[in-house]
Image (spheres, helix red, strand yellow):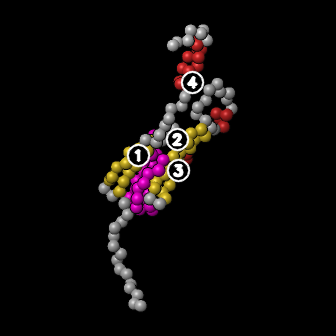
Amino acid sequence: MKNNNALSIFDEMDNFFDDFFKPAKYDMKSDVREVENGYEIDVEVPGFNKNEVIVDYNDGYITVSAKHETNNEQKKHKYVHQERTYSSLERSYYVGDVDKSKINAKLNDGLLTISLPKPSLEAPKGKKIMIE
């Protein structure tokens, strides 16, 4: 049943602006692909620069985290509405055993590409065996 109250139009307008200014939920969208000698992960991090993005490898997991805070220039202004003050995202990927010494990452136009080389399967060239 519709409310005929004259104030209901203002309630509807408030709801419209609340929905309009509500920040969109953002997930780190990604693609994982196998390449000749390893894997590559592309992760979307739009609006973040390379100083705000961290990539860690620990116990078979790659964790990408991005954090953006309000800068001093933004603090000088009196805003009526502001949504870009702080954002923080994090996502982990299980990658198993990779050559952690050769992992590398590049950020270009909001796309982070992480290269994960497979470990070398070279057999040891020799081993001295001790006699007990």
Disc on res. 48: 2
Q: Mark 1 vs mark 3: which is more N-terminal? A: 1
Q: What separation in Å lies between label 2 and label 4 (alpha carbons)?
A: 26 Å
Task: Look at label 2 and name its amino acid.
Answer: Phe
* Contact (Cβ within 8 Å) of mark 1 with mark 4: no
**Foreground: disc 1 or disc 4:** 4
Three-letter amino acid code at disc 3? Ile
Q: What amino acid is labelled 1 in the image?
A: Asp
User: Alpha-carbon distance for marks 3 and 4?
Assistant: 33 Å
Position above or below: 117 against 110:
below
The residue lying furthest to the left in this view is 36
- Tag shown at residue 42: 1
Of labels 2 and 3, earlier in sequence is 2
> Which residue is label 4 attached to?
18
Q: Residue at x 61, y 29 (%)?
A: 82
**Precedes in sequence: disc 3 or disc 4:** 4
Q: CA distance from mark 1 to mark 3?
A: 14 Å
Give me the disc on residue 54: 3
Q: Earlier in the sequence, mark 2 or mark 1?
A: 1
For label 3, the SS is strand
Q: Earlier in the sequence, mark 2 or mark 4?
A: 4
Work out whether 67 lies above or below 97. Answer: above
Contact between marks 2 and 1 (CB within 8 A): the answer is no
Q: Is residue 128 above or below residue 52?
A: below
Q: Position of residue 118 (x, y in %)?
A: 36, 60
Give whichever of 129, 93 is nearer the camera. Answer: 93
Circles 2 and 3, Cβ within 8 Å, touching? The answer is no
Residue 69 in picture, x, y percent from top left: 61, 40
Crowd tier of the residue under label 2, counting other residues whose Cα lies within 10 Å: few below 14, some 14–19, many 20 or above: some
Q: Which residues are magenta?
A: 91-117
Q: Is residue 34 left or right of residue 78?
A: left
